[in-house]
Amino acid sequence: MENFSSVGKRIPKKDAIDKVTGRAAYIQDLKVPGMLYGKILRSKYPHARIVRIDASRAKKLMGVRAVITADDVPQIRYGFFKDQPVLKSGKVRSYRDEVAAVAATNPEVAEEAINLIQVEYEALPGVFDPVDAMRENAPLVHEENKSNILKLPWKLVAGDVEEARRSAAFVAEDQFTVTWVTHCCLGTEGIIADFDLRNNLTVYRNTQIPSLAQRDFLDALRVMGLKDSKVRLIKPTIGGGFGSKLDTYGFEYIAILLAYVTRKPVKIQRTREEEFRYTSTRQPAIIRIAQGCDGNGKLTFRDISMILDNGAYTSWGATTPSVMMMPISSLYRVPNVRYEAKCVYTNNTWSQAMRGYGNPQATFAIESNMDQLAEKAGADPLEFRMLNANEPGEVTPQRFKITTCGLKECIQEVSKRLDWQKRRKEKKEGRGLGMGCLIHVGGGARVYKSDGCGTIVKMDDFGKVDVFTGATDMGQGADTIIAQLVAEEVGVLPEDVNIVDRDTDVCPWDVGAHASRTTFVAGNAAVMAGRKLKEKILAASAGFVDRWKDKDGTRHEIRLDNDTTNLVIKDRMVYSTKEPEKKIALGKILRGAHYEKGGTMIMAEAFYDPDNENLDREYKGNLSKTYAYGAHGVEVEVDKQTGKVKILRYIAAHDVGRAINPMLLEGQIYGGGAMGVGYALTERLILDKGEVMNANFRDYKMLTAKDVIPIEPVIVETMDQDGPYGAKGIGEPGLVPTAPAIANAIYDAIGVRIKDLPITPERILKELKKKENSH
Amino acid sequence: MRKTVSFVLNGNRMEMEIEPEWTLLHLLREELEMTGSKSGCESGECGACTVIVNGKAVNSCLFPAPEIEGASVTTIEGMAKPTGELHPLQTAFIEKGAVQCGYCTPGMIMSAKALLDENPNPSEGEIRHALAGNMCRCTGYVQILDAVKFAAHALSTKGEVRPRKGEERIA
């Protein structure tokens, strides 16, 4: 085994000490002198015409500094299709629609002012079901489109599905549905916007996309007529992301507008209730699936169509079918694939990225249906998966080039640890085993023109490294992973590496913390920069002479080797492998580089952009440099009287390339798994005619410490040739196969298949009753 | 009507004029600018604002500020010694990987402290019960439970929480 000093170690998260002492400052904790507080008035209707807005009473309230409506400000538009203005006029299309905003000297006055704004609406018939929304004569959410179906036809075709279906020995077909769930970041979203006298904008914002948000804000300033302004974005400590902060939103632009109008810093901080109501969700879908195999159990085709409730406007949610294509085309070897998805406007909340980005929805249908097909073919579901599992070297129907692939090892780990073959056969009343597998991007994802990340590394005079990275840590541990990689590469200790990732004025460009890409992309950039830095240190070390006198006046001199290939940096010292006893402190050499005549700076930069491909017009191309695989196996006990599901064991085996930090990696698997179990069993945002009915933690059932799942992470290392020290991304995979694994286990336990998430006790009891009645 | 309250905050005697409608969280965060106690829901559901009042973990976002008269209040800022020496719970949270985004962490640690002060050898069930009001979205709670168990052991054996135990890589 390789002898690494930092890579592979269970090193605690770098900023943990600030977090356990209460020193870490989140957006909630920030104040800028002279700051005003902004508040937003949202629509009272899911769909209505705005007849009149009267803000006169709000404007007169003591402490109010500005009230703005669409009439008062330039029309900044945002969203994937730029289909919504920041402040609405004419019409509102959801309860989230921003109608007016206030800036006041304190939050209470802002709130009071909001309540004084009178808006007269003329209610319009709304549409809250995507199937209804596709009917002729359905109310139109955006009249100018003449249809509620988004002009974004998702279609992937490979091979001949019709022919494969005709010749298949076994076919399983069914329909599955998934509903709204939300991120529940413990730290809600917030922003402070502040202009200087030259109209340069500083934004404090807990975002996952500092560089792209900077560009969005610059575009907004141009609309406001501010052509030469600069935008600086400062990220405070982020209280969780999970995809929720991958876009820019109305409240951010409103804070910017209020700051511009008042010439004061303006903060908008979301409350928990607002967070539940106005955070873009994971998108609901109605999924129709058919899969078939030949007489030997080899998959021959997969045919999927989906209808997605997009909600009233577009954010990244509208593009999640692009990621759904990944498991549809490339989970298991399946030569003939067809996938079509329609995103439909409704007057519901609109959707965004959420951990897994469409993959959990698609995988729920695929993996549930895999068990249905295995049953038809008379195969054990685990063996059926082994038979069809992906292998290294394969090119999938979507043209993904599979390099390393640990899917079979993961399935075997699940089998071994659950004693699958034996336990599946011995039937215990109410107990069952199930499994689900996954593929996800593990080597970046070229969803933009660039999938790059920049890194600057700089040595100080004393042997410490400052790393300026474009990467964003929102708790997942990017700070620590990057420090470990730089430390390993340069030859210093991880505690000697300081990560600077907070400020666009000093940090290089990055496309954002999405697609489980940070360890792979930012990690590779850090390794490249670290390597260059080491070369510079070694160049400065070559022939370096250290002279000193000891206590009794004896003179000493050490001269390092002139040949840099013999030089090593280790334990804060530099020495030659030829004379390892002659060591010079790293700091001495660094100071020498600065103080000597014709001195030099010991710093380096690197930009890493993997040579992965954008999907082409047919939605094909090698999206990621490598792919992460995994298999989850679960044992459940279902109480047939109450419909309650108890998870007895949970094995989560993941092909991670290499574990840079097993402790943080396990944290991703535990956290992803818990979120996945919530998706499977308890969580749903309940909407009634577009209105969120459970905007609090009492009614939105996130798992608590009482519900801890006995997850056993299994790390399978495949040493990816393109990953930093062999690593792949692991941020999202943990929750991808959870729901189908549990659904399959429930089926094994009690013989009913629940096809709608979440799998509540009510749904289980209903299906049990149906089954009884059919006997 | 303003009111004067006297109380002990992290070992320091305090006397303050407060508004009767303030919550303890408001007093801490807005008036004293002690932002270690987090505001997560302002309705007693998430536990991010947990502090200890007279030995009991409370949601400071619901706790009326006037009721701290004569009370002893401990917040996350009072956990480490002024010398910088961390409380064993803090060390355990760091070393066991119990911290990700960290927003729930101060509240978690305060709930755990109230538990261990009263019950130095809690069962896993008792730990889960004590932390049930503290929501975490990042960790799945597994490493948090590990940390509390580890700290309980360290505290009860008066042993130091040794850093980097089990540095070996797992297979």
Image (cartoon, coloured by chain):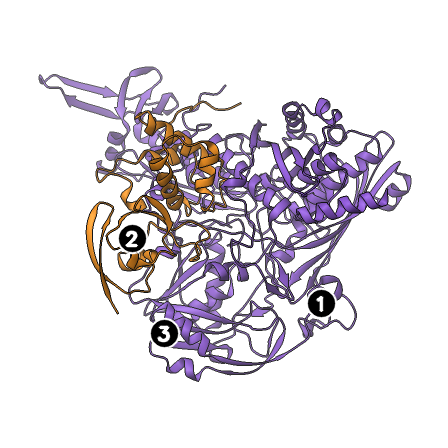
**Under tag 3, what secondary structure?**
helix
Q: Residue under mark 1: which chain is it in?
A: A
Residue to which mark 1 is pinned: A148
Q: Residue under mark 2: which chain is it in?
A: B
Chain letter, colour orange: B
Q: Is residue B87 visible?
A: yes
Describe residue A60's horizontal placement relative to residue A687 as left or right.
Answer: left
**Under tag 1, what secondary structure?**
loop
Residue A707 is drawn in which quadrant?
top right
Q: Estimate the x, y position of residue A206 in percent, counting from the top left.
A: 44, 54
* CB under 8 Å between discs 3 and 1: no
Image height of A692 relative to A18, above or below: below
Residue to which mark 3 is pinned: A262
Residues packed near mark 3 inside 10 Å, few (<14), some (14 to 19) or many (20 plus): some
Residue to which mark 2 is pinned: B34
Chain letter, colour purple: A
* CB under 8 Å between discs 1 and 2: no
Q: Is residue A468 visible?
A: no
